[in-house]
Amino acid sequence: MPITLAIIGAGPHGRQLALRAARAGCSVLLEDVMPSNLHHAQEFIRQELNAETLPAVAFVSTIEDAVRNADLIIDCVPDELESKLEILWLLDRMAPPHSVFATPTIRHSIADLASCTYRPDKVVAIAAEPSAFGQAIGLNIELRTSPATSPETIALVTEFWRQLGFEPSVSDQ
């Protein structure tokens, strides 16, 4: 069953991920508070996808609209502690209880970040720079979990990356 993916941040990495996810059959909501980022993302994706698949990507300007029905939420905010804590705090309060969070970070402990939410069992780190999201199919991608991460969360995130053509590996942090 296709998942509904919310991507927070429509900069170059967010739009690459949205494009790849749409091509893999996901329903994508791409959010950015900057109208120019959304406009550039829409033009980029329109050029890359044909008119039949463009409806698979919706462009929204609020986090609430992006996460309302999301199964998986990936942020494309800077890998700075304050940014990560702020976005996870917002997502935790706005997303439905079933939503899983995946945050790209190579600097921060996913156990520490997950403990700042009310759902540490639904938080995973993507141990890659967001620039890897547009890379060639077959690239390895490391998913980092905490002791609290549930098997269902790991399965959902692993399957998502496989659908996108990556070879995910999972490690405990």
Image (cartoon, rainbow, N blue to C red):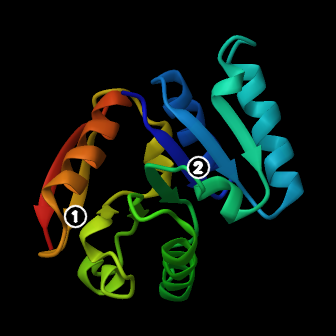
Q: Position of residue 29 (x, y in %)?
A: 64, 44
Q: Residues within 10 Å of mark 2 (few under 14, many from 20)?
A: many
Residue 65 sits above or below residue 49 on the image: below
Residue labelled with disc 2? 13
> How many numbered marks, from 0 up?
2
Question: In this orientation, which residue lies closer to the viewer: 119 or 77?
Answer: 119
| Residue at x 59%, y 32% (from the top left corner) | 19
For the residues carrying marks 2 and 1, which lies nearer the camera in this image?
Answer: 1
Residue shown at 75% from the left, 41% from the top: 41
Q: Quadrant of residue 59?
A: top right
Q: Looking at the image, is mark 2 or mark 1 earlier in the sequence?
A: 2
Residue drawn at the location 71% of the way across and 22% of the way down: 54
Q: Which residue: 67% across, 63% down?
A: 64
Q: What is the x, y in percent for residue 36? A: 88, 53
Amino acid residing under circle 2: His
Q: Quadrant of the N terminus?
A: top left
Q: Amino acid at mark 1?
A: Arg
Q: Is residue 97 left or right of residue 150?
A: right
Q: Which mark is residue 144?
A: 1
Residue 4 rendering spot, x and y as whole percentages: 50, 40
Specify few, some or many for label 1: CA neighbours under 10 Å numbering under 14, 14-19, or 20 or more. many
Q: Would residue 30 appear left or right of 71 to someone viewing this image?
A: right
Q: Viewed as shown, does residue 104 lie left or right of 67? A: left
Q: Find numbered disc 2 in the image and state the secondary structure of the residue it sits on.
A: helix
- The residue lying toward the viewer, choosing from 157 and 94, is 94
